[in-house]
Amino acid sequence: MSIRATLFSDPACPWGYSENPALRVIEWRYRDQLDWRLVLVGLSEDTSRYERLGYTTLRSAQSWGSYRDRYGMPFAPMPKPRGAASSRACRAVIAARIQSPGSEWAVFRWLQLANFNTGLLFDDDAQLLEVLRTSPGIDPEAVVAAIDAPDVLGAYAADKALTRTAAGSPTEFQGKAGNSDGAVRYTAPSVVFEAGDGRRLEAGGFQPGEAYDVLIANLDPTLDRRPAPEDPAPLLEYFELGLSTQEVAACMAAGNDLPDVRAAELALLALVDEGRAERHPLGGDAVWTAPGGPVPPSLPAVAASAAV
């Protein structure tokens, strides 16, 4: 029996981005026994709320360093030229989902990586296109062209409505729900696990990976639970989009051991030396792939485009 896992997230959320190591651990342990669905939160349609709260691009960049230091995903803290809402990025993910089901995960990851490591502005379609041209499994021009299409707008509205059904939920009970537009919503990242018999368990907001594991174990203790690998190579073979050093370290940690980022990096460098892995610098760290894997997104010409 598979378990339905619904991830509520948004490519603009640093909490959602920092949750990736924990999510990779669960994906590694349970593979196709979890049936994943991505629901886009739609954090912002414009920047007015952030402006009212005094959340500037400088303040945002300054906060990214703390996420990097505490949770380990690559960040390149630099104030962007201006703020930008996440709506068009969310709709790009949905357009990919409609056009090529399953490809939304690659688009979502590419937008996360680019958002926190380049000057990408989510409301600039030229920049979105430049980033998505390196995302596997999609037609980037078709995806960007569909951002305002009626079916994409309708699916986006449905995702937003589903996100805003957290009133009275365990997520709200734990103080991990949000309410930025008049409805109690699941924050990014929240995961809802559902068994085939209708049982439902929630991990609202940012959580350690073991919180997910406990919920899965209670829903179905008959699942096959794969142990941590002793070598990073199987991880790079399984995660075709590549992994950050922190993601590798998290997946290699046994039981409740803390991830050993230095040991993971040394093992990854040994694979590079043997020609069994590639290192792609990103945000002061790197994304590691199997040989020939996709190169993480970059945006070298962002300054000129953003100044318009």
Image (cartoon, helix red, strand yellow):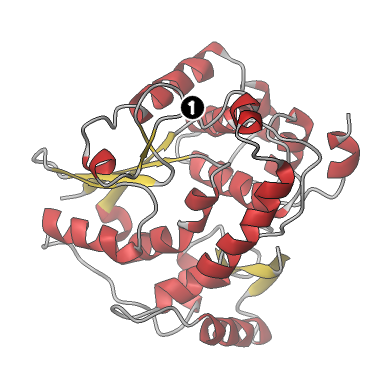
* Residue 185 at x, y percent in the picture: 36, 32
Q: On the picture, is 145 further left or further right than 222?
A: right
Q: Residue furthest top?
A: 150
Question: What's under tag 1, amino acid-wise?
Answer: Ile
Q: Residue 137 sits in which quadrant?
A: top right
User: Mark 1: few, some, or many residues within 10 Å (few <14, many ≥20)?
Assistant: some
Please identify the quadrant where the C terminus is shown: top right
Quarter where residue 9 is shown = top left
Give the answer, above or below, for where 55 lies relative to 282. Answer: above
Q: Secondary structure at mark 1?
A: helix
Q: How many marks?
A: 1
Please identify the quarter of the rendering in which residue 262 is found. Answer: bottom right
Using residue 63 as the reference point, say whether residue 70 is left or right of it.
left
**Residue 94 image point, x, y percent:** 51, 29
Rendered residue at 61%/48% (across/down): 110
Q: Residue at x 63, y 56 (%)?
A: 64
x%, y% of residue 176? 34, 45
Residue 115, visible in the rendered structure? yes
In the orientation shown, which residue stands out farthest toward the right? 304
Q: Is residue 236 visible?
A: no
| Residue drawn at the location 45% of the way across and 35% of the way down | 101
- Could you say where residue 224 lies in the image, as x and y percent from the top left? 20, 66
- Residue positioned 64% across, 25% down in the render: 48
Position above or below: 204 against 64: above
Q: Which residue is mark 1?
A: 98
Front residue of 41/82: it is: 82
